[in-house]
Image (cartoon, rainbow, N blue to C red):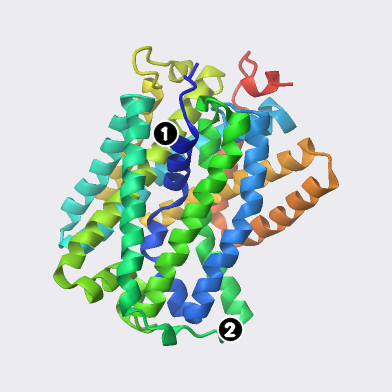
């Protein structure tokens, strides 16, 4: 069994790392370009408010079932082991796809700032993966230490950035002439920057007091994330021209260069590296716990369910994920398949699991307020699902494999919870 060592501040750092990702490096500029300065600020604010129902739903389900199986455990409670097995297979097929792509997005930004070639860029991305796996390999203390330090550095750097921008800000750039349809499209774009709450569900078993601390830590992390998003978006829209090429390609780099000159590139590289590290560390943590719980419950191969006594880390699960990450990097190097496709697969799979989690929340909570919250969140999620087409065959295929494989004689931990 995993050790209960996570404090509320460890959880806040993991929450920020799970949600705050490479979208911060690009999306403020894209939304500004598409809907103007006022529209961009409102898109980030409104989408932040729409993240609150997801936080309430995941915190409620996790407090009911604080287990490393996370989303799969929720689904087991509501619909039984067969649906939970399908969810576990979808998750197991999602983590190896997303983490290499996410790390390479950050590496590309480092390459832009420092002038690296393609192989050097791949090396930086793979180095981030090795750092995240290696840190988690050493155990919970090493993982939380890295996360706490990098989140503190990143938060300080972003806060300093906002204050450095203030003397150069041109408030006259902010215009509130809005059109609602483009604003909704910008919110759909920003939606991806607020995904990640579900990753925290896999850490619940390691909380010292999940019933007391889980929801509180999510909301503290949410407040920090929202302030950072709004601060950086404000900085971009008051510094850069709306139609400039750099606004849509590398807005943070353009902003740093305009304020600090040549040293800006080094700071952008550091910023991109810190964001990528905290993102990778949090998602490797969550993925390893999912693989561990699947092995423990005999949904995945049982050897994945072993814990190293000395470190308390699920090293068999981490080693398996490292092999899968490496194979994905080899594939990207040899066949040059699209990072965008991998990110869309990663996002759509979690949206499918969001839908199942919302249905589970609806079934397990009887009050009309809870069910109204579920229906409203379901509508929002369904709208964003319309973006995907043929790629939905991937999670459907993983569900089909789970349902067709022989059922083992096991009882999911989730079903033993009253």
- Residue closer to the observer: 251 or 117: 251
Taking the image as shown, residue 362 lies to the left or right of residue 122, namely right
Badge 2, how many Cα within 10 Å: few under 14, some, many 20+? some
Tell me if residue 83 can be seen.
no
Q: Position of residue 338 (x, y in %)?
A: 36, 56
Work out whether mark 1 precedes mark 2 in sequence or the reverse, and give the earlier one: 2
Q: Residue at x 42, y 45 (%)?
A: 17
Q: Residue at x 50, y 32 (%)?
A: 203
Q: Position of residue 20 (x, y in %)?
A: 43, 52
Q: Position of residue 262 (x, y in %)?
A: 14, 70
- Residue closer to the observer: 169 or 285: 169
> Looking at the rendering, in which quadrant would you find the C terminus?
top right
Taking the image as shown, residue 19 lies to the left or right of residue 238, namely right
- Residue closer to the observer: 277 or 331: 277
Please determine whether, in this image, residue 190 is positioned above or below residue 68.
below
Q: Secondary structure at mark 1?
A: helix
Could you tell me how far apart the alpha carbons at marks 1 and 2 are, in whole angstroms?
Answer: 41 Å
Q: Secondary structure at mark 2?
A: loop
* Residue matched to label 1: 285
* Residue matched to label 2: 178
Q: Position of residue 184 (x, y in %)?
A: 60, 72
Q: Residue at x 26, y 47 (%)?
A: 125
Badge 1, how many Cα within 10 Å: few under 14, some, many 20+? many
Tell me if residue 10 can be seen.
yes
User: Residue 45's image quarter?
Assistant: bottom right
User: Residue 238's image quarter?
Assistant: bottom left
Residue 31 marker: none
Q: Residue at x 23, y 42 (%)?
A: 127
């Amino acid at each position: 069994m995993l050790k209960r060592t996570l404090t509320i501040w460890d959880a806040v750092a993991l929450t920020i790392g799970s949600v705050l990702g490479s979208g911060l490096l690009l999306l403020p500029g894209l939304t500004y370009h598409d809907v103007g300065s006022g529209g961009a600020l409102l898109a980030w604010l409104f989408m932040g408010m729409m993240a609150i129902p997801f936080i309430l739903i995941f915190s409620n389900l996790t407090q009911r079932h604080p287990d490393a199986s996370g989303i799969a455990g929720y689904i087991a409670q509501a619909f039984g082991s067969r649906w939970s097995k399908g969810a576990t297979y979808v998750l197991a097929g999602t983590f190896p796809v997303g983490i290499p792509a996410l790390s390479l997005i950050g590496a590309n930004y480092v390459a832009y700032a420092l002038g690296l070639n393609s192989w050097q860029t791949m090396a930086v991305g793979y180095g981030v993966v090795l750092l995240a796996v290696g840190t988690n390999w050493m155990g919970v203390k090493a993982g939380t230490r890295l996360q706490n330090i990098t989140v503190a550095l990143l938060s300080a750097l972003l806060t300093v950035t906002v204050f450095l921008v203030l003397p150069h800000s041109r408030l006259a750039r902010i215009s509130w002439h809005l059109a609602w349809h483009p604003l909704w499209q910008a919110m759909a774009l920003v939606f991806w920057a607020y995904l990640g709450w579900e990753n925290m569900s896999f850490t619940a078993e390691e909380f010292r007091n999940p019933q007391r601390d889980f929801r509180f830590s999510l909301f503290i992390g949410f407040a920090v994330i929202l302030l950072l998003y709004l601060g950086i978006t404000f900085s971009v829209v008051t510094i850069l021209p709306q139609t400039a090429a750099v606004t849509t390609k590398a807005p943070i780099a353009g902003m740093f260069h305009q304020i600090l000159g040549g040293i800006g590139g080094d700071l952008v590289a550091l910023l991109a590296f810190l964001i990528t590290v905290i993102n990778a560390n949090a998602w490797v943590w969550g993925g390893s716990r999912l693989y561990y719980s699947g092995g423990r419950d005999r949904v995945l191969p049982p050897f994945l369910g072993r814990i190293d006594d000395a470190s308390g880390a699920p090293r068999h699960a981490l080693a398996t994920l490292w092999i899968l990450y490496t194979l994905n990097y080899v594939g990207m190097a040899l066949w040059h398949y699209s990072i965008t496709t991998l990110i869309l697969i990663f996002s759509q799979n979690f949206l499918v699991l969001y839908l199942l989690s919302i249905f589970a929340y609806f079934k397990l909570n009887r009050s009309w307020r809870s069910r109204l919250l579920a229906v409203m969140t379901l509508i929002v999620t369904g709208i964003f699902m319309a973006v995907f087409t043929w790629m939905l065959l991937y999670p459907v295929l993983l569900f089909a494999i789970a349902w067709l494989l022989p059922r083992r004689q096991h009882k999911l931990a989730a079903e033993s919870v009253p």
